[in-house]
Image (tube, grey):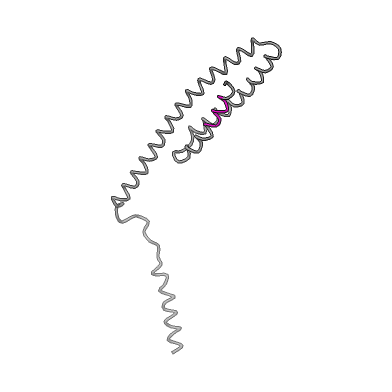
């Protein structure tokens, strides 16, 4: 009887690899209509987010261009000023330059951000813009 159990176990162990062969990697059926609708919805969502991001980038470009005009005006005022006023304006100008560079970097990050990350980058862009705008108020 013991010999029969070992024989059965050996037979089962030898047949096991036959049932565990590789499966075909090519799908045998088309995606279901539900799967296609999900993919279409994901694509539409991504496209809408990209369009919204691109619109926001255009708005921020315009707003930063307006602040660049104010930066140039400040530069002219600093060039004409004398004494303590000149020092104050030059200090303000240097601070504005640093903040302008940060805002430009954030805008570049925003342009490069994918559709599911751009909202997070948008917050830091807003902060950088507000910091720069504060210099000119």
Residue drawn at 38 percent across, 61 percent down: 23
Q: Would residue 88 be found to the left or right of residue 131 on screen?
A: right
Magenta residues: mostly which secondary structure?
helix
> Where is residue 96 shown, x and y percent of the image?
60, 23
Which is nearer the eye, 123 or 29?
123
Furthest-right residue in this view:
83
Quarter of the rendering containing residue 9: bottom left
Q: Residue at x 33, y 55 (%)?
A: 27
Residue 46: image location, x then y, percent:
39, 40
Give the magenta-colored segment's residue range: 126-133
Report the quarter where the C terminus lies. Answer: top right
Location of the N terminus (image quadrant): bottom left
Viewed as shown, does residue 108 lie left or right of 39?
Answer: right
| x 44%, y 79%: residue | 10
Q: Taking 125 as reference, is 70 above or below it?
A: above
Q: How many marks?
A: 0
Q: What residue appears at the point 42 percent right and 86 percent down from the top-left corner?
A: 4
24 in relation to 3, above or below = above
For residue 40, what is the image quadrant?
A: top left
Judged from this view, the residue extending furthest toward the bottom is: 1
Q: Residue 49 at what x, y percent from top left?
A: 41, 37
| Residue 102: quadrant of the picture | top right
Q: Is 27 drawn above or below residue 109 in the view shown? A: below
| Residue 93 among magenta residues | no
Residue 129 is one of the magenta-drawn residues? yes
Task: Residue 125: give x, y in percent of width and height.
Answer: 52, 32
When the figure is inspected, residue 23 is found, relative to residue 126, above or below; the finding is below
In terms of depth relative to the viewer, which is nearer, 28 or 61? 61
């Amino acid at each position: 009887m013991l010999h029969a159990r070992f024989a059965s176990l050996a037979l089962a162990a030898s047949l096991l690899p036959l049932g565990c062969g590789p499966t075909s990697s090519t799908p045998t059926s088309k995606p279901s209509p539900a799967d296609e609708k999900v993919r279409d919805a994901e694509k539409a969502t991504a496209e809408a987010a990209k369009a919204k991001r691109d619109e926001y980038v255009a708005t921020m470009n315009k707003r930063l261009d307006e602040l660049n005009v104010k930066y140039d005006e400040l530069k002219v005022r600093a060039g004409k000023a004398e004494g303590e006023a000149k020092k104050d304006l030059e200090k303000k100008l240097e601070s504005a330059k640093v903040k302008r560079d940060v805002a430009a970097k954030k805008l570049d990050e925003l342009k490069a951000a994918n559709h599911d990350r751009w909202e997070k980058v948008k917050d830091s862009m807003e902060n950088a813009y507000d910091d720069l705008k504060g210099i000119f108020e």
